[in-house]
């Protein structure tokens, strides 16, 4: 009796794994959040890119790698500098960008 119940449970489990679970179209509620266009964010990005263009080539590369969320170890390997040097350069670049954006 135990063996029959166990085999039945295993069979039902295997069948349930094969089935694709679906939902009725009416039961699904789509919530789309409409956001208004904010021009200030786009202007800030343009100012940022304009300020980055004023930097040197290595500084630009460092900023773009930083904006891509790369680790300082990856940045240092890519640019061929030490990790500490990459951190120091990034802090100096941040200060330089602050002075460019807020004269």
Image: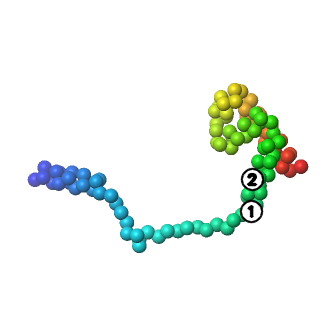
Residue drawn at 73 percent across, 58 percent down: 41
Question: Residue 64, position in %: x, y?
Answer: 70, 41
Q: Is residue 93 left or right of residue 29?
A: right
Residue highlighted by disc 2: 45
Residue drawn at 34 percent across, 60 percent down: 21
Residue 86 shows up from this direction: yes
Q: Is residue 16 above or below residue 69?
A: below
The extreme left residue here reads: 1
Mark 2 or mark 1, which is nearer the start of the sequence? 1
Residue 95 shows up from this direction: no
Residue drawn at 29 percent across, 53 percent down: 17
Count of number-bearing discs? 2
Residue drawn at 73 percent across, 40 percent down: 63
Colour mapping: rainbow
Residue highlighted by disc 1: 39
Q: Is residue 47 left or right of residue 78?
A: right
- Label 1 packing within 10 angstroms: few (<14), some (14-19), many (20+): few
Q: Secondary structure at mark 2?
A: helix
Q: Nearer the viewer, residue 9 or 33?
A: 33
Question: Residue 97, position in %: x, y?
Answer: 81, 44
Quadrant of res 68: top right
Question: Residue 87, position in %: x, y?
Answer: 73, 34
Q: CA distance from mark 1 to mark 2?
A: 10 Å
Q: Is residue 52 above or below residue 39?
A: above
Question: Residue 33, position in %: x, y?
Answer: 58, 67
Q: Is residue 102 above or below residue 60?
A: below
């Amino acid at each position: 009796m135990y063996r029959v119940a166990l085999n039945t449970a295993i069979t039902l489990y295997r069948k349930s794994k094969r089935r694709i679970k679906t939902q009725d179209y009416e039961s699904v509620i789509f919530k789309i959040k409409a956001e208004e266009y904010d021009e200030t964010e786009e202007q800030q990005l343009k100012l940022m890119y304009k300020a980055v263009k004023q930097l040197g080539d290595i500084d630009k590369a460092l900023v773009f790698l930083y904006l891509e969320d790369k680790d300082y170890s990856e940045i240092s390997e890519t640019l061929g500098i030490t990790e500490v040097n990459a951190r120091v350069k990034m802090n100096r670049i941040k200060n330089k960008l602050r002075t460019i954006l807020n004269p």
